[in-house]
Image: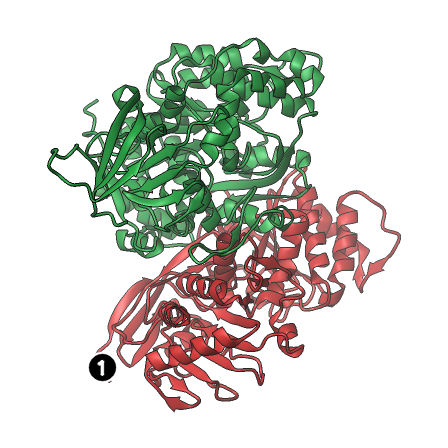
Amino acid sequence: MTGTMRLKLKGGTVVDPAHGVRGEVRDVFVENGRIVTAPGAAAKDHQEIDVSGMIVMAGAIDLHTHIGGGKVNIARAMLPEDHRGDLVDRTALTRSGCGHAAPSTLTTGYRYAEMGYTACFEPAMLPINARQAHMEMGDTPIVDKGAYAMLGSDDFLLRMLAANDDQQSINDYVAWTITHAQAMGLKVVNPGGISAFKFNQRMLDLDEAHAYYRVTPRRILKVLAQAVHDIGVPHPLHVHGCNLGVPGNVDTTLATMDAVEGLPMHLTHIQFHSYGTEGDRKFSSGAARIAEAINARPNISADVGQILFGQTVTASGDNMAQFRNAGAGSPKKSVVMDIECDAGCGVVPFKYRDKNFVNALQWAIGLEIFLLVDDPWRIFLTTDHPNGAPFTTYPHLIRLLMDKTFRNEKLAGLNDDAQKLSNLGAIDREYSLYEIAIMTRAAPARTLGLVDRGHLAPGAAADITVYRPDPNPEVMFAKPAYVFKDGELVARDGAIVKVTWGNTHVVKPPYDAAIERPLASYFERFHTMRMSNFKIGDDEMCECGHGSKLLRHTCRLPSTR
Amino acid sequence: MSAASERHDVPCPFCGLACDDLSIAVALDRVEVTAKGCLLSRTAFARAGHPAMQQPRVKGVVAPLADATAHAASILAAAHLPLIAGLATDVAGARSALALADRVGAVTDHLGSAAKLRNLLVLQDAGWITTTLSEVRNRGDLLILVGTDVVSRFPRFFERIVWVRETMFDLDPAAREIVYLGEAANTDAGIAPDGRRPTTIACENRRLGEVLGALRAVVAGRRVPRDEIAGVPLAALEALGARMKQSQYGVAVWAAGDLDFPHAELAVQTLTDLVRDLNQTTRFSGLALAGTDGDYTFNQAHTWQTGFPFRTSLATGHPVYDPYHHGTDRLIATGEADALLWVSSLNPARVPPATAIPTIVLGHGSMQLPREPEVFIPVATPGVDDNGHFFRADKVVTLPLRKLRDSQTVSAAAALDAILKAVG
């Protein structure tokens, strides 16, 4: 099948929340890689696939998955013992590789596509390491890619804040970074904390001052959220907050929500930031308070970062937290890095155990958040791959959300004390197929500003997943019957039938080129790379991506505020 | 002689430091470093820029590229265990080599892997705490150079990282302390701008494990019941340990290539475990300098494409990582490998090992080979006659290598892709 041939998906049940379609039997037409309106009765379809009785959705979109960049590759290199358990043979069509905790790039693309995912976003791209991230994503087949540039502990920004530079200059710097690192959004990780760790600070709470710059995380969050808003990047500031994994961090997370004073903000892997200090072991669920706060604040969205039991590896820009957590790793090894006056990283293998009190409660906290947040447009399905669990667990996670009986059976097998401390068993909610479609395609497309993805109206890119209904959602979501990427059939019944290379999504917010004067000087005075070599050109992006297309998305007009 | 044009901010791929501030005069028949050069870069750019024999050869006879790639493909396809090695190349060359290796079921190994494994085994066994060049430049107040003088391998290290004009913080770069521990050929680079001499604690590199073990014990407050270790007075280690604990941002620098003794990985691990101990109270990091000949470059691409580091076999259809079994020297000595594809587009001095098995070589046209291979394909040098990407010594920064002039020479990646296509 080629992209130019017209295709008719006949008689499927369409679930398309972007247009309020909750399950309508109708045909979907595809031509030149796009969804098109039904041709006239006289038109003859070139190809027809009967999908009657099946569920037709847009391809799924993962807005937070660590698939490319230095720390992911460290995780791969560190874990031969894990990867040996999931070796992938080459076929006539596909390359060999390996799966599980930190899969090879090729296997990552195949497995996402086999599961009906058609776009993945790397959430923590260090600007100084952006080339590597893009090259790894360029070797990730089929799915579309994009990345959020990480700022907030970089010395250039902290120097600007310490010097009280105006918001406009910060906006220019942020826009310049996003543009030349070829990013789709902006992320902040442990605001200021990665830098503070280099000055031997071991914690940095929301209102605590950085030892050298005397700047607080609250201020960093505010200026970056403001910058993202002002320069018109569609996705709000993507925030990995302070105190990841620390009991009692729920208070910090609640305060963080208000630190941006009503500006849009996305809180990522919020499960890891929703811990109380109640109970004998001083570790408890803060999920109810978190969910209540999200429900009350329409400017806030979150993804969960659900943990699931088994071996995985945690890979984070948060070197401060990862250094703290290294002792709890399994197998016991860890990498912690300070990186280029730009950021840091920490990689710690982890084995989540269902009989372990903390792990069991983490599992329950994640699910409580999913089930207590009312609006599926503002809560996203992630495991923070691979930090909570590998992305291949998504079908299992979907079943936990959709099937209360199954969920409670699993809960009953966990650590007893954790069960007693969790309210999960009392929650009756079961996600509907429509809500799953919102949180896995319509909502991520909307928050990212992907106007032609995540829905099935004429004009949309023909990224389409067709599921065979099954009473067990885990079965249904593991191996969709058909997956189309830009109109081409790429996977059938969970097996790859064609390898394409996907597109790369970027935004290019405008900035005042005068920002390059202080930047060029900064690179020359303090760095070990010239500014001109830092910038990644569009041609270079295409060289790195097997000729994949660079898709530039519009930013809103610069704000006048 | 053609007219030269001048380029600035040119990245140099001829050692792991990957300086990107060079000025270079470029002509069709020569390339010359005009500013910020070092011995390595001046020689390497001149050699890479020299016009050389551009025609492929099959059995020593000039042949069209298509014939050369077809013959190479037939050798690889007929082999039971092809070995793709050398691999001193850029990311594009690495990617194409891996695609070919997967197709023909080859083992891949890098010419620098024996040295690189001294670090990789530590990463896989315990991990470590490390830092990068710009962090050291701005923060490092104490640099301990372990078993290396650094500058023999990375000539501009002190110029660009240590004795710089200013740092971002309150650290006077000229006030940094330099300690050489182990063998160091040239300690002059460690003399501060004000003439202050570095501290030298000499011992044989092969005994570094003992010395570092004692140092770790001293730092941990344990009693070491000896007056000297491998010729090093205990008092010298006690003084060093105390200094390390006092530093705000100490850095232990090593170059695995200089730690050429059996089980050097154990010495490296003792050092990185010591660094981890120090971080209980202060900040201290390792800096594992490598990257030369694209060892990091190939290993990074190999790791993301297969999920394992190099010395991996794809013969059984999936990656089998075995750092002992899959070494080039062993596979050739035992006769297990029955065809060799040697890629060295970054360094014509890196020639294939002497072997009677059918050999295909992709290298610069000026490469002096000990014996004529079955197939020789002259390829472009990335950063001179082709664009490319190169991973620097700290494994974080990737430099964009620029094509400096018009060239008809095929890239290693294109030659490898053509061989893959001919394999079918």
In front of the other: B245 or B289: B289
- In the rendering, at what x and y percent does residue A1 appear? 28, 49
Q: Is residue A30 visible?
A: yes
Quarter assignment of residue A201: top right
User: Which residue is drawn at the image coordinates 50% and 31% (left, top)?
Assistant: A475
- Side (left or right) of B326 relative to A155: right
In the image, the chain rendered in red is B
Q: Given the image, on which type of amino acid does mark 1 rest?
A: Ser
Chain of the residue displaying label 1: B
User: Which residue is drawn at the image coordinates 12% and 33% (left, top)?
Assistant: A41
- Note whether A285 is above or below A270 in the view shown: above
View extreme (right): residue:
B225
- In the rendering, at what x and y percent does residue A155 appear? 42, 39
Q: Which residue is mark 1?
A: B2
- Note whether A444 is above or below B362 in the view shown: above
In front of the other: A101 or A394: A394
In front of the other: A381 or B20: A381
Q: Is residue A191 visible?
A: no
Question: Quadrant of the image for the C terminus of chain B?
Answer: bottom left
- Side (left or right) of B346 relative to A230: right
User: Which residue is drawn at the image coordinates 55% and 31% (left, top)?
Assistant: A388
Quarter assignment of residue A50: top left
- In the rendering, at what x and y percent does residue A371 appear? 48, 15
Quarter assignment of residue A505: top left
Q: Secondary structure at mark 1?
A: loop
- Note whether A423 is above or below A79 in the view shown: above
- Side (left or right) of A486 relative to A560: right
Chain A: colour as depicted: green
Question: Quadrant of the image for the N terminus of chain B?
Answer: bottom left
Classify mark 1: residues with Cα within 10 Å, few (<14), some (14-19) or many (20+). few
